[in-house]
Amino acid sequence: MIILKKGNYTYSVSNLRVGSCKMYMRWKFMIKKGISWILILLAITMLAGLTFNDQDTSNTDLQAKDGILDLTGISKNEKVVALSGEWKFVGNEYVKPTDILQNAKVEIVPGPWKENVQYGTYQLQVTLPAHFDKLGIRVRNIWSAHRLFINGEEFASYGTLGTQKEGAVPSNPVYEIYFKPKTKSLTITLQVADFYNARHGVIFPIDLGDAETIAHDVVKDVNLEKTTIIILFIFSIFHFSLYLLRTKDRAFFYSALYFFTLALLVSTRGERTLIREYPAISFEWYFRLQDFITYINAVTLFFFFVYTVETLVKRRTAITLAMPLILYGVGTLLFPARSLSFLQYFFFGYINVLALIIIGRLVHLLITKSTKIPRNELMILSASMFSLLIFSISGTVDQLFFSGKNVLNRGGLLFFILGMNVFLAMRLINRTTEAEVFSERLEKATIGKDSFLEVTTKELEQPLYHALNVTKSLSAHRTLIEHQLLEQQLERLLYLVNDLKDFTRIRFQDFHIEVHPVNVQMIFQHVVKMHERTMEKANIRFYTHADSQLLIQADEQRISQIVYRVVETAIAHAVNGEVVLTIMHLDADVRIVVEGTGPDVIKQIAADETGQSIGKAIIEQMGGSYSVDILHNGIRFLITLPFGGYEKKQHNKTDYVLPLPLPTLNDNLPNLLIVEDDVIHAEVLRSLLQNHYAISLAHSAEEALYTIQHKKPDYLLIDEVMPVMDGLVLTKQIRTQYSYIDLPIIMLVANEYPTNISLVLESGANDYIRKPASKESLLARLSAISLTKEAMTNAIEHEMNFLQAQIKPHFLYNALSSIISFCYTDGERAGHLLTMLSTYLRYIFDSGKEGHRATLEKELEIIQAYVEVEQARFGSRLSVVIEIDESIDTAKVEVPSLLIQPLVENAIRHGIFEKEGNGCVIVKIEKEENFLVVQIIDDGVGMTAEQVAALTMGKNISSNGIGFTNVLRRVKELPKASLMIQSKLDEGTTMILKQPLKEHANVENYYGRR
């Protein structure tokens, strides 16, 4: 019940009660259940008639022998016989219909040609019984073009015969012919050509019998097939309607698709109703459609079971199992008709295997009870699937020429369709029962909700008011700043409790308001006073333009809650800016405009949807309007309420400004920088962690970057959502200068959705924690990244020791051998080489002690020392050229130590020394914007594309030296660094190293060693 009190008047609006809702749900489900049972009973009646009236050919036991069929012995009750058995057959030859095939071989009809032929002539001599007068012949399936002669006279011709595929035109109709024979002996000659299908010749039996009986059977079979198609289309529409009513249940979608494709499948097979009704359809597209529908029909049924029984198979496994059928079905549609027919029997078997898998899984779930589906549903589903298996296997047998039509095929389909609909009806009954149970629970929960809400709000309000009063008495003595924060938070909790109560009552349409004149400016002043410290910290100025005596018609308690939400949101958008309140009288209304703007264009902060919806609902109940506009640099609230008093203008202006001092760091504790635009939350975090860390605060990303630049902290705690620059962008910017080890970052997130967490970690955060976080959680996360940082530092130390151990043995022996040889011929040269070798070794040893970064000048010195030692061994065969951009100060630019030199060494050892003749290595160092680009170019033996791919994937193609794999891994650890390889066999190799440009004066040690 919604109650609105205004003056002496009370308005009430009744809402739909839970009991009425329950009756409506029962009525709705009863209608659905009734429709389902009506359709099922209709299907039982019509499909049963279809199945059991669809008799096989009257006489299939009488078989032709050696091309002769004697029917004189059949009874007068036998009206139709099948011309099956041994027919005379001549392959790859068209015999004249007047010629009698005496010595020809025999072929079993129906059946495929045994020999590898593509055209030929059938012949059968039939002796008619006395009671056969006017005759009819019924042809169901002959592949493909053919001419039918009786006693030398042509009675049917379809397609064009030929001795090659180019001249033949295929055709495969279902037809009947009627005639009155002149004699009791018939010579039936059939010329057939087939260059398309995998199975050639007479596929289904040819029926011969009384003309009237044949015509009656054809009409009956066609009508039954049309009835089947109509029923299947009705089921398809019904199931699709159920899917539209409940789109979450995709099983209805696939069952609708299954019945639809099954209807199309029936229309293209059997009596081929589709081609009878639309004879203009070409042979090509008719059989493409027939084959495509056959396999897609099986796919839709498979996915029906997958979505009906969620534990049947995994979705990815289901797609994998269905993919062969999908690909083959699409192939039959895209390629010429019957060009893929040689694979069809394999896929018929594959469909049967899938059916067996489904049955096995259903039985397993039924026995183990490892599914949430009710047992009665699972049993019906298993029985239906067994009927489908009978239908599928009998259909496959039907295609393998064992019969023309069979009852098992039709009966299996009948019981499967009925089983599916009984299953869905049973599911509907079960869902109805569940809905009734849930409806009763909902009614009880609603009563419990009202009681809980009443008790909870009262129990929360009383201690909050007591705590607030005690805190105010402490604040009066100006003891600690934390008391002011506590006072603000307790009063905020009171507003939140009221919001909770209103939100719940609004959702259940069970709240009331009391309207009377209210001074809204006084409410704004009180709320702004609560946020005074927040605005001081965030450097926000507050201005008021209003008449201090202007009144509105409103519920004072509710308007106070709305004002609190509005001011809080405006402050969040106005960091380093201003909040302006404007209240004006316009005719019968009062317009209230609250605008919070900052100096910069900011990233839009999502407003509290729950709070805004509560405010809008309450304002509208008080006869006003409520809207929110997101500006390019802030937010604007526009509220209108009925005018409640006389206008008396008075201009007030209040300005709150507090400069932000640079925070100081404590050297005795680990330094933690908290970046949080919410001043209150930042102070709470400080109070939680101040005994364990030296805390400094930054209320914006700009302030955080300034603090980091002047004195880098040990750890960062960053809020994800902030104005101007959010936490994700700030983290990415920090990562351009500092690695995960150098400056660990924990992100404060509002939710833990997988997509959001992925963005947080991709931005460069080491870890995340959801707000609000407890003290224990914060300390645990900080301790974890501290231990990780220490472990990684030790790991890097071991890595450098490993690199030193690999470099020294592979190079030292050859270098000393060369120097010894010079001692006997050129002492001065030997001394110089010893100096170079000493420089090289000292650099390697010192790199593990002084950190893992060095100036570019130092790295070039070690390259020069290495090159001179190698040139002493190989003389004029090796030349090295170093080109440096003049704008680069090598004494200031820093690079990771032992990164460029190994690349030069690899170019010399694996490029130049394996080449016959002289070789050259060029080291080119350039500056591109904020990146240092180093190119090592050699004209050595080069590499194949496979070798380049192996190196890029991190596989060493040589076992000597430190290996390219180690270098590549170290490059990947550098922020925004890359290493590319360009090489051609017998032409040379170019390696391009690109890394952010860093100078010694502004960059801390990359690996965090100080």
Image (cartoon, helix red, strand yellow):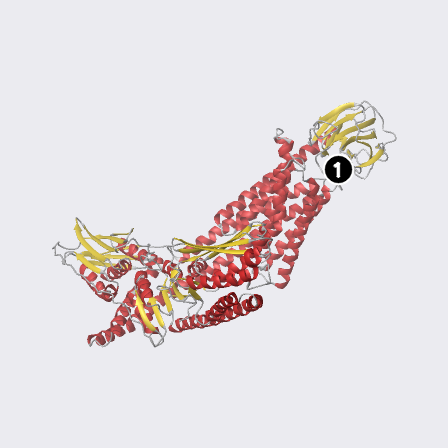
**Residue 910, image x, y percentages:** 57, 57
Q: Is residue 500 above or below residue 257?
A: below
Q: Is residue 391 above or below residue 891?
A: above
* Residue 265 makes an appearance in the image: no
From the viewer's perspective, is 204 left or right of 697? Answer: right
Residue 373 placement: quadrant: bottom right
**Residue 83, image x, y percentages:** 79, 34
Q: Is residue 278 above or below residue 486?
A: above
The amino acid type of the residue labelled 1 equals Thr
Q: Secondary structure at mark 1?
A: loop
From the viewer's perspective, is 347 left or right of 836? Answer: right
Residue 14 placement: quadrant: bottom left
* Residue 886 makes an appearance in the image: yes
**Residue 557, image x, y percentages:** 24, 62
Q: Residues within 10 Å of mark 1 (few under 14, many from 20)?
A: many
Foreground of the two, 572 or 697: 697
Foreground of the two, 747 or 442: 747
Foreground of the two, 755 or 615: 755
Residue 1004 placement: quadrant: bottom left
